[in-house]
Amino acid sequence: GGGSDSGGGSDAGGASDGTITMGFAQVGAESGWRTANTKSVQEAAEAAGVDLKFSDAQQKQENQIKAIRSYIQQQVDVIAFSPVVESGWDTVLKEAKDAEIPVILTDRAVDSADTSLYKTFLGSDFIEEGKKAGDWLVEDSASTEGPVNIVELQGTTGAAPAIDRKEGFETAIAADPDLKIVQSQTGDFTRSGGKQVMEAFLKNTPDIDVVYAHNDDMGLGAIEAIEAAGKVPGKDIKIITVDAVKDGMTALADGKINFIVECNPLLGEQLMDLAAKVVAGEEVPARVVTEETTFTPEQAKEVLASREY
Amino acid sequence: MSVLTRTPAPLDRRRISRLQGKARYAPSLATVGLFLAMFAVGAAMYPGFLSGQVFLNLLIDNTFLIVLAVGMTFVILTGGIDLSVGSVVALSMMIAAALLQAGWNPFAVILLVLLTGAVFGLAMGAVIQVFEIQPFIVTLAGLFLARGLCYVISVDSITVTDPFFTSMAQARIPLADKLFVSPGVVIALLVVAVAFYVLHQTRFGRTVYAIGGGESSALLMGLAVPRTKILVYGISGLCSAIAGILFSFYSLSGYSLAATGLELDAIAAVVVGGTLLTGGYGYVLGSLAGVLVLGIVQTFISYEGTLSSWWTRIVIGALLLAFILLQKLFTRKVRLT
Amino acid sequence: MSESTPVVDMKGISIAFPGVKALDGVDFRLFPGEVHALLGENGAGKSTLIKALTGVYAVDDGTITVLGARQSFGTPAEAQAAGISTVYQEVNLCPNLSVEENILLGREPRRRGGIHWRNVRRKAEEVLDQLQLGHIDPRSVLSSHSIAVQQLIAIARAMQVEARVLILDEPTSSLDADEVQQLFSVIRTLRDRGVAILFVSHFLEQVYEVSDRMTVLRNGRLVGEYLTADLPRMGLISKMIGKELDALAELEEAESRRQPDRAERTPFLQAEGLGRKGSVRDVTITVHAGEILGLAGLLGSGRTETARLLFGADRADQGRLSINGSVRTLRTPRSAIDRDIAFSSENRKEEGLISDLSVRDNLILAMQAGKGWWRRVPRSTQDQLAEQFIETLDIRPANKDALIRDLSGGNQQKVLLARWLITEPKLLILDEPTRGIDIGAKTQIQKLISGLASGGMSIVFISAELEEVLRLSDTIAVLKDRHMVADIPNDGVTMEDVMTVIAGTGA
Amino acid sequence: MSALLRHRLTWPVLALVLLLLLNQLFRADFLSVRIQDGHLYGSLIDILRNGAPTILIALGMTLVIASRGIDLSVGAVAAIAGAISCMYIYSSPDPSSWQTAAMGVTIAVVAGLALGLWNGFLVSVIGIQPIIATLVLMTAGRGLAQLVTDGQIISVSNDSYQAIGAGFFLGLPIAILIAAGAFGVAGLLTRRTALGTLIEAVGINPVASRLAGIDARTITWTVYVFSGLCAAVAGLMISSNVTAADANNAGLYIEMDAILAVVIGGTSLAGGRYSLVGTLVGALIIQTLTTTVYTLGVPPEATLVFKALVVIIVCLLQSSRARTLFRQRRRPVTEQSQVKVAI
Ligand SMILES: Nc1ncnc2c1ncn2[C@@H]1O[C@H](COP(=O)(O)OP(=O)(O)OP(=O)(O)O)[C@@H](O)[C@H]1O
Ligand SMILES: Nc1ncnc2c1ncn2[C@@H]1O[C@H](COP(=O)(O)OP(=O)(O)OP(=O)(O)O)[C@@H](O)[C@H]1O
Ligand SMILES: [Mg+2]
Ligand SMILES: [Mg+2]
């Protein structure tokens, strides 16, 4: 209990009248993926009758901490957030715990040693995504002879998905010594970054066989660079990406991308379920991995029409 | 050749010029007044807003920004600018986290970080002064350099587990019934007090203002212009390092991407606090008020809680604009030139 | 004044700027206990010599000895530490700080680590009192004072230290008689205490009144060093401008201009009870075509502010203004300029010069502004006008591409005057146009003004020298305590008459 | 020779040449340009094409800075322009016709002009310090752009639209032709009319300029409008280059690049004299630097350090002080403009 003595709309008793108040601290709106994620949470909250307090941290950890503090101050029933970065949450999570507000992590993990600070973590496994990409490549190039030159378009330097997708991919391709990453540079998760980097790669390395992009957008940028260089994306140069947003799936269906590892942003319903359980005091698993799959061009054609994002 | 003689000036002239002297405080005072007004509006709009802890949280959540704004005030008062502060904060955090991870003594770490920050600032100041390169560009290069060094130290984020840092992060200094601040707040306010003292009670501080009033005049008046200009960047570097330590207390980690764009927040806070970017006019207390204003804008938004991401940005921009316009309105009569 | 060893001994000093040899092998000596006047036309190199001595410029050649030791100061601070206190030509203070701080900046009394503000105030008041400036509030902001007051504060700053050498570069150009006398009495006291004083002025009376010795420069070269007693005034002038005496006689000759008949003149500008809150009030004047209206008044009496109202630089909120018969409100300088009014400000550094632009660009500026940005004044016209005015006003160096900030003070003033002449205004408002201008140029400018009036231009003329006002004006408007008190047609008015008006009428 | 050494563009140009040579050293065919599919192809062409938006924005920024201002909102304006045009094309019934593209472009350009008007209004009429006035739009602008696109990346497939950023005309990238055109127009406008001199005058001494009859307000206003226009066109290029509007990332940090270009080109942030050619060279240096990072394969974590070092070296070379330091001491106190007004 804090300084509010008037007991406004969202007192601790909020849960008893049936409505749950949830404070959700989003990373930002840095990509289409993230926007889909936000929308999913907002829509699910509405459907579940959850009173959602939403805030956008604009990719800054300090903003997110401020938002969480203000949720604690406002005595919400549950706090959910996608941490901007893994580390540095102990203090504010302790404050939440002291105020007896349960916390759910979404999409990205925190590295707190004290796992009692949050109830559960709902989200994808980035290393696994990288592995899936790598595994496909190992399988795909098993038949080909000789070295395979891979160029990698990394995400924003230092960002967790970038680090993990790189790591997972590298682990997987270690299985085949022919697979070699010849160049790797950051494209900042953006299309124009991907395009510019790819342009330079194409000039540096004449015989690129595979592009591995940490997200669809960079892959789409790379496609344009490859086409401008007079090569055929998907044939002359194979492309593997992560995310499976609509534009990426379209390119996959067109055969310009060869393989996409899904990273599902639609966590809203799962989150609301978990929140209801947590507020009701039920046990929840400590880790909930989102349902994610991979797509080949054929699969893409099938599901393309029904993709929401 | 005869020239007219002067009769003693009428008395009211004395009063007029005194008033014009007071006008120097107007923008900063307007900031404080508007901050209070915003607080009142917030209290009227959102339940739970009107609480001492909401105000104290503004301090707790902005310790590093307060310290940065103090350093930035020194620089801007001389008519310069320091874009490197955000990156130096990140660098300080990385150094601290990496060294603590390697098992260093926390006090040795803090000392080293402060030293690094100060030296980094002094080096930029020296380049600005000796080679007469514009501060904007030197500190922009500083921004790249410090951020790049962060990555060189580690691309991953590093968690701080040192007991001293942890206790600083989680300690609460109780003030009154259920009100508390963090140790960082005390440090930040101490920095403000020291800066206030330095600016108003030392020759160095007055030279800072003099340089802002006219660099060549200050030089001709025989003031230590080159030394002061270099030192000012040193101070800003030192403040960035302190802010880095405070940020480490705040987040108990080091992260290469931390504090991006913080330099703009610091500059905005200083300017909102009534300091002229061309130098010569402004106060650290105004900058403190500026930080609080930026903080309360964010508090407004998290209390609102229904804005989608883009509306958040738009509303922040609109609130900033509304604030600047109101400030302008209150200080309209004042001619600073 | 003993021929003891000089405190300052400069030998063979040369300084060249790109395109100009500002000093060329100049020798200069300064003895303790003397007032030494440094003389020369605009651009002769006086300010440069001072800056060479005080470490602002590095010398290309030559040696400087101060108190027997070879010196080459790297910064003004070093010169100050060696006992040389300087007031430079332009006011070089910090407009954002208070008066007391400007006086004591860099040497504030301290107490336990902090500045002892009470002592700062006391010391500032002391030195202000010495210059009889006790009425100035030491806590007021410098920029709230007129240029004249700022000049006095700069002098107060220089006198506040116990210096061995005191250098004053045109300290009197904007002071009134009383203040000049006050300054001189302080100078004499300091001299008697053995301080060496270097003094630059274009007012020869003052030079003869206060100096013991003088050094004359011409075009960056030394003409000679003389005892004041040995060199009569005319001799000095001819040494300064390098011409023989009969040429001078012609310069000195007063203008006799046909005064147009009052009845047949058309009024160009009429102000009735014009005023502005917190500034001047009750300004009721009429300026006819071809007439020169002089504004007289004490320092700070509101002449500049009146001029600014007439030009729309400040907006009037009382009274009525009509131009060419129709009532107008001047909101901006632009609207005044569009009605053929021009205004040359007394504060050339802050309100006149575009320091980083060339002489040509500065000359052409007002004309260009009038044409709008789209219609550029053709380059050939620019060149031709620049050359023409450089010639008529004898602007030196005669280089239209020189940056105006590199010109000497007097030459900058001429460029600014030319800026307005080019626009061929119907009414020209001149606020202290002859300040800081050498005697030759001054006479030239006075001639020019009356010539312009004869050609039909109306002129509002402001000068701290009442003589000059009396000599040139057809009508004299007297201001006192920032409102207008009288409007006297100048038919044989004497200085005493004007003084009586100022002293007599109740406030 | 010494005159050449003193010229303020000598060192930036030299730095640019050195950077290019460095690349050539690492990759033998770096400087070679060949014809492919009827247009020029090669790293140099990439540098020009990718540099075009920066050049364009830096062009507008130069004039703003000359007038003693700064425009932080250019990146956001670019994002808005891209968002508007792509959204228009995306949602129009005929998304691949050139008329649609033309209409989208027109709307975006008008929006850019309007945003420039807005900045200019805040600075010149209300009198807010430029950095804050444009910070408002910098913050809110990206939000507006996202509002337009609903936070999504809007892909369009319209050949005419794609031509702006990625197309070729007579073998040359259209983007660079547009930038060159804008450069020419700006050069002509400022040097053949009096605009350049008037901007400089306002930038050096606003008080004196006003007293000389210059309508400083209109001049200031004009430069912000021009900057808005340049940013909008740059935004079109950026979005057209990847055939998509990315409200969040398009033109991110481009304001910093543009300011850097202006300053490297020898224009002082204190306002006054400016050099458009200098800005051009500055922008090319920055773009070449980015390409160099990719060409040399600088590891991502060292990229920023490398950039910092190059910027510092370029500026050191360029600083007049560094040059005189090795010669004789010649140090007149720089008479900076004494008039201090709110920028
Ligand atoms: N920084 C500079 N750069 C280039 N030329 C300069 C500079 N300073 C002075 N000059 C030139 O040196 C010459 C001497 O100037 P100086 O200011 O010493 O004259 P002065 O005797 O003080 O004249 P005035 O009586 O008008 O003040 C002039 O021709 C002037 O244009
Ligand atoms: N002694 C003084 N103390 C304070 N302020 C003064 C003093 N004298 C003048 N001022 C201020 O300086 C400004 C200028 O006055 P103004 O220039 O109109 O007078 P002036 O008759 O032109 O005198 P000056 O000879 O100084 O130019 C006014 O704002 C006035 O308030
Ligand atoms: Mg002089
Ligand atoms: Mg006056």
Image (cartoon, rainbow, N blue to C red):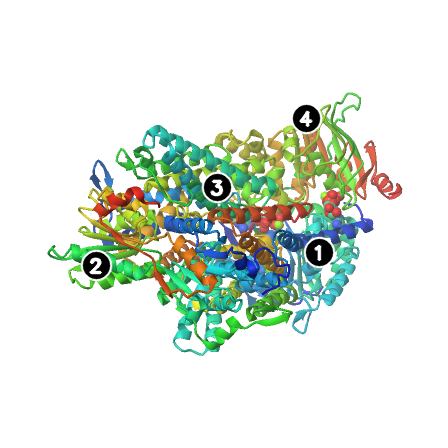
Label 3: chain?
Answer: D
**In 3D space, how far apart are the residues under numbered discs 1 and 3 (Cα atoms)?**
39 Å
4 and 2 marks on the same chain: no
Q: Which residue is mark 2?
A: A135
- Say whether disc 1 or disc 4 marks the residue closer to the N-terminus: 1
Front position in the image: C263 or B94: B94
Horizontal relation, residue A291 to residue C145: left or right: left
Q: Which residue is mark 4?
A: C455
Q: Tag 3: Cα neighbours inside 10 Å, few (<14), some, or many (≥20)?
A: many
Chain that bears disc 1? C
Name the quarter showing ligand 4.
Answer: top right
Query: What's the distance in space between the residues labelled 3 and 2, CA to CA?
Result: 54 Å
Q: Element type at marker 2?
A: helix
Q: Quadrant of the N terminus of chain A?
A: bottom right
- Residue corresponding to mark 3: D63
Q: Is residue A19 left or right of residue C488?
A: left
Label 1 crowd bin: few (<14), some (14–19), many (20+), radius 10 Å: many
Residue closest to the far top: C264
Residue at mark 4 to residue at mark 2: CA–CA distance: 96 Å
The disc numbered 2 marks a residue on which chain?
A: A
Q: Which mark is residue C153?
A: 1
Question: What type is the residue that disc 2 sits on?
Answer: Asp
Secondary element under disc 1, as helix, strand or loop, is helix
Q: Tell me the kind of residue under disc 4.
A: Gly
Where is residue D314, by image quadrant? bottom left
* Closer to viewer: mark 3 or mark 4: 3
Residues tagged by mark 3 and mark 4 found on one chain of the structure: no
- Judged left or right of residue D75, residue D302 is left
